[in-house]
Image: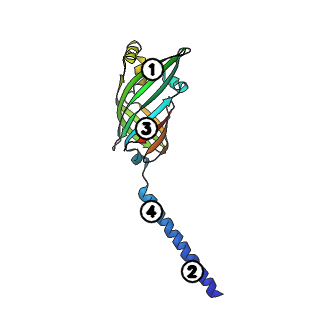
Amino acid sequence: MDLRYMALQKEFEMRRYAGLSILIIALMLVGWTWKSTDELLLGTWKFTFYVPAEEAAKMSEEPLPEGLRMELSGSGRMTFHRGGKANSEGEFTLRLIAQGQELPLRFLIRDAGEWKVHGDTLVETSADSAVVPLDDLTKSVVRQSPEFQAMMTPVKGESSSTKIIHITEDMAEMELLDPPFYKLTMRKVK
């Protein structure tokens, strides 16, 4: 009986060591492939977004006139460089909707600045930006109401915070923590 007990005990110890060895190897592999959020963000990303009327209205410093709705959508590219520098470029459409009529205002926005990750929050600070009307209709409206262009222009030194919901090597889901509160889906450019 003692021999059988000793054999079972030896077999148990060997299985325990084998299980422990597998766990150690798995942890080493995970450690070798794990990247920080900062490292995952590095590179160029394509993005798209849509801001519904309720959230887009929060962009205006003054209440919108009765019956006027505003929506915002866009797409572009954002690049995060080593050293905390970033730049982005995209086309944005601000849709003004009233009495069944829609007025689409199209802009090209370029921005350069800095970025830093704090936990699960990406903070971007604008250093230089330009907003350019893309068509004759938009140019005409901006001449008459420059506040539309000013509303879309990032202010030098102004920061925005974005919660990083999920990020991998190829895809990121984020949510802007400042008005307008919208979700952003980004895909890494290969």
Circle 1 residue: 104
On the picture, is 21 further left or further right than 44? right
Q: Which of marks 2 and 1 is nearer the N terminus?
A: 2
Cα separation, mark 3 vs mark 2, equals 56 Å
Amino acid, disc 1: Pro
Cα separation, mark 1 vs mark 4, equals 54 Å
Circle 3 residue: 123
Cα separation, mark 4 vs mark 2, equals 27 Å
Q: Position of residue 153 (x, y in %)?
A: 39, 25
Q: Where is residue 188 in the image (x, y as percent from the top left)?
A: 40, 43
Q: In which quarter of the image is the C terminus?
A: top left
Q: Position of residue 48 (x, y in %)?
A: 45, 34
Q: Quadrant of the N terminus?
A: bottom right
Q: Which of marks 1 and 4 is nearer the N terminus?
A: 4
Query: What element does badge 3 sit on?
Result: strand
From the viewer's perspective, is the residue at label 2 or at label 1 nearer? 1
Query: What element does badge 4 sit on?
Result: helix
* Mark 2–mark 1 CB contact (< 8 Å): no
Cα separation, mark 2 vs mark 1, equals 77 Å
Which label was assigned to residue 129? Answer: none
Classed neighbour count for the residue bearing mark 2: other residues with Cα under 10 Å, few (<14), some (14–19), many (≥20): few
In this rendering, the answer to whether 83 lies above or below 23 is above
